[in-house]
Image (tube, rainbow, N blue to C red):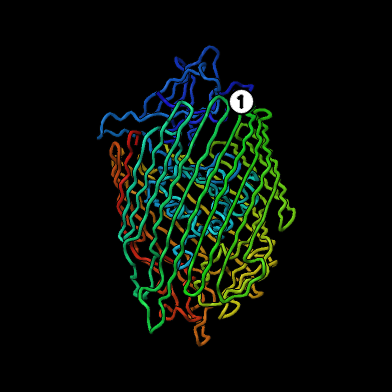
């Protein structure tokens, strides 16, 4: 039998329509599943996201769900207390280890169905690459770029809509997470094997989660305690000497209570120095990461909660000391403890009326050493939100809430620098209130308007308006428009402590709250070509800063200046992508993005350094008819860009002011079995790497030493092999 979950339920509206979603046992949506009333011809098929809506029929209570390759389920809705927003999970009907039946490939990505423009990424897409952590989960995504911030710490940073990940709000199941000193390393703190899915929303997002989203949100969804009971193991190793082990297991303790353990270990076994500059190409990383999650559901009360612990050490720098100088050492140590809880109570299922209380707390200790410079942070972040939601009727719904966020960042820094008095001890309490209204006319017209007011103990009161509209006159055409404001409190040392590895002096000016408007438009088309559709998406986004933080390398040959700028900087991006199924099991996609990102440096409007002018992405994925073999490849073409002025000891510019375009090829082959799969692949098979990622590597104690100007891969081709095993649950 299928498993049926009802989280927050609503009864049928005046037209007596049931709605829900059909997925496999792991929660991946099944597009094209059949849903009908028993002994009738009245039925529907699920859409690309596995969603369906079906009219009720008097006297009919048996709802039948079927999909080729899965066990048919018959559900008696008269035995359910709540009968809408159903999540119907179908089990694989494989009989033995060699039998895998697949009708259509599961969609790895799908567009978000509401007014906000965004993308859902599920495990089918994540399995196309090794995805050892969140930072490696976007290799097949044309919208999100992931690059090294420097050649010293190994930290990776997201870029969305042409701007750094500092302007992307990171969420863990709708809870703001990975802030302050955790932000530069957040992508490495989320093991890919723990992920059930990722949602990437672009532009001004909902006001529910706060005011910080300027270019978008990335919300990660972990494996859940109430998923199908079982355990999993993921083992990984690569040619750079990196090994990983990931384990997950969940247990249904009672009918209402379940728990889950997530564990991760990684270690680097080799000292990499392929370019022979006497510096580590990559830091040696050792990380232990543990989560324990709980779920309780009885009647109308639902609880989610959990605790986490992370310990990580990164070691890099000089391999051997030279000329009687001490070894230039770079190291970071992190200890992180976290806890969260969600309480939800459904007051009126018929109106989807519910209250929810969401809270989280994180304690983050971070120590870093860059030669003779050091940075340490002891941070406490506490977040709480009270939410109320209700459907006025089938077309109108409202959401309102109160929130409070507390940041306490005690920092200690030893460096040659100038900084304002508030740079070391940052405390801020932000209390807020929001309201959001949604109008939905049969999914053809969706309007969403939200407004929140927040009061900061540092910056006072500010308002965040956001507006979204979606028009879908037919199943083959839709348009989205959005506009909204976002704010961000600068945590200059927490955000940019990797700059301490530079030989330059770090100059920190007076900083104020960042503020920007983001507006965007997107168009989605489905063009029928026989029995298949060519899917085309285009979008344009403009982000204009009223006040922004500028990291200026051009100001002086001996300084990096970080300061607020009231001069309007901006980012505008245009992207077009297309997806097509050539034959059964074979999918191809192509995307192109053009970026124009500029800010004022030394009073002059210039292109932001280390930013690619364009990106082109081509992907190919083929899964054999029986689902035994899968072949995935993606080719990236990354455009050139501007390099900041850099001077050597003779005050001469040592670069030509720009870097050239380069390409990257990633390939993976997967062999699927009944309870496990083996994957083998390679990354950056074109072998392109930045020739001199560290300037003046032979003189790390001089002012000309510079490891922070990274624009391309710093390692050549890498090969890997991995094993995924499922115990007791379906593959």
Where disc 1 sits, the SS reads helix
Task: Point out residue 699 in the picture as x, y percentages from the top left corner.
Answer: 43, 81
Q: Quadrant of the C terminus?
A: top left
Count of numbered circles on the image: 1
Judge from the rendering whether residue 139 lies leftward or rightward of residue 215; answer left or right: left
Dividing the picture into quadrants, the one containing residue 276 is bottom left
Quick one: label 1, few (<14), some, or many (20+) residues within 10 Å? many
Q: Which residue is mark 1?
A: 349
Residue closest to the far bottom: 650
Q: Quadrant of residue 729?
A: top left
Closer to us: 320 or 38: 320
Q: Position of residue 438 (x, y in %)?
A: 66, 37
Left or right: residue 404 compared with residue 496: right
The picture places residue 33, in percent across and down from the top left corner, at 43, 29
Height in image: 123 above or below 140? above
Residue 693, image quadrant: bottom left
Residue 21 in the image: state x and y as whole percent. 49, 31
Residue at (68% x, 51% y) in the render: 430
Residue placed most toward the observer, 287 or 209: 287
Q: Is residue 48 above or below residue 648?
A: above
**Image quarter in which the N terminus is found:** top left
Q: Is residue 534 visible?
A: no
**What residue is drawn where x is 47% and y is 49%?**
309
């Amino acid at each position: 039998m299928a498993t049926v979950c009802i989280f927050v339920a609503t009864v049928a509206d005046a037209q007596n329509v049931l709605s829900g979603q059909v997925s496999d046992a792991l929660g991946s949506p099944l597009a094209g599943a059949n849903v009908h009333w028993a002994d009738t011809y009245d039925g529907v098929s699920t859409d690309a996201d596995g969603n369906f809506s079906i009219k009720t029929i008097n006297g009919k209570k048996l709802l039948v769900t079927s999909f080729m390759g899965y066990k048919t389920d018959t559900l008696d809705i008269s035995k359910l207390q709540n009968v809408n927003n159903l999540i119907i999970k179908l089990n694989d009907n494989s009989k033995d280890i060699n039998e895998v039946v697949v009708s259509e490939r599961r969609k790895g990505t799908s567009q978000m169905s509401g007014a906000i423009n965004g993308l859902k990424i599920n495990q089918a897409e994540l399995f196309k690459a090794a995805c050892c952590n969140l930072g490696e989960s976007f290799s097949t995504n044309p919208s999100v770029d992931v690059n090294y911030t420097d050649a010293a710490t190994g930290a990776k940073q997201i870029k969305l809509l042409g701007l750094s990940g500092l302007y992307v709000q990171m969420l863990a199941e709708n809870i703001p997470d990975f802030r302050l000193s955790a932000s530069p390393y957040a992508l490495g703190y989320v093991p890919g094997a723990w992920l059930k899915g990722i949602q990437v929303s672009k532009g001004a997002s909902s006001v529910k989660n706060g005011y910080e989203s300027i270019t978008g949100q990335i919300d990660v969804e972990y494996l859940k305690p109430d998923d199908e009971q079982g355990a999993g193991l993921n083992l990984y190793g690569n040619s750079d000497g990196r090994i990983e082990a990931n384990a997950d297991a969940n247990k249904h303790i009672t009918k209402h209570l379940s728990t889950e353990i997530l564990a991760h270990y990684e270690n680097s076994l080799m000292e990499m120095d392929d370019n022979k500059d006497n510096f580590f190409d990559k830091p040696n990383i050792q990380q232990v990461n543990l989560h324990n999650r709980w779920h309780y559901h009885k009647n109308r009360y639902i609880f989610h909660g959990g605790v986490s612990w992370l310990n990580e050490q990164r070691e890099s720098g000089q391999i051997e000391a030279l000329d009687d100088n001490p070894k230039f050492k770079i190291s970071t140590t992190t200890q992180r403890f976290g806890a969260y809880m969600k309480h939800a109570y459904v007051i009126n299922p018929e109106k989807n009326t519910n209250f929810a209380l969401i809270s989280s707390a994180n304690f983050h200790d971070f120590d870093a050493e860059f030669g003779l410079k050091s940075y340490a942070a002891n941070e406490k972040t506490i977040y709480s939100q009270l939410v109320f939601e209700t459907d006025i009727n089938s077309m109108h719904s409202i959401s309102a809430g109160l929130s409070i966020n507390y940041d306490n960042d005690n920092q200690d820094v030893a460096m040659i620098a100038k900084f304002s008095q508030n740079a070391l001890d940052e405390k801020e309490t932000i209390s807020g209130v929001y309201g959001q209204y949604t109008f939905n006319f049969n999914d053809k017209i969706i309007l969403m308007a939200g407004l929140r007011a927040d009061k900061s103990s540092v910056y006072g009161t500010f308002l965040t308006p956001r507006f979204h509209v979606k028009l879908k006159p037919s199943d083959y055409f839709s348009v989205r428009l959005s506009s909204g404001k976002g704010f961000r409190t600068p945590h200059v040392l927490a955000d940019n402590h990797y700059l301490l590895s530079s030989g330059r002096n770090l100059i920190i000016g007076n900083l104020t709250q960042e503020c920007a408007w983001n507006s965007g438009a997107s168009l989605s088309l489905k063009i029928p070509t026989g029995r298949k559709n060519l899917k085309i998406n285009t979008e344009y986004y403009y982000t204009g800063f009223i006040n922004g933080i500028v990291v200026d390398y051009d100001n002086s040959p001996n300084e990096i200046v970080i300061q607020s700028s009231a001069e309007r900087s901006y980012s505008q991006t245009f992207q077009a992508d297309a997806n097509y199924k050539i034959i059964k099991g074979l999918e191809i996609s192509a995307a192109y993005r053009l970026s124009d990102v500029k800010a004022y440096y030394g009073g002059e409007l210039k292109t932001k350094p280390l930013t690619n002018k364009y990106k082109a992405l081509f992907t190919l994925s083929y899964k054999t008819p029986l689902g035994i073999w899968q072949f995935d490849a993606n080719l990236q073409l990354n455009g050139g860009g501007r390099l900041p002025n850099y001077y050597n000891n003779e005050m001469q510019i040592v670069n030509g002011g720009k870097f050239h375009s380069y390409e990257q090829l990633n390939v993976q082959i997967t062999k699927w079995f009944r309870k496990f799969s083996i994957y083998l692949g390679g990354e950056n098979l074109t072998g392109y790497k930045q020739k001199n990622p560290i300037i003046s590597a032979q003189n790390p104690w001089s002012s000309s030493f510079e490891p922070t100007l990274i624009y391309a891969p710093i390692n050549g081709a890498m090969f890997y092999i991995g094993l995924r095993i499922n115990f007791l649950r379906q593959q």
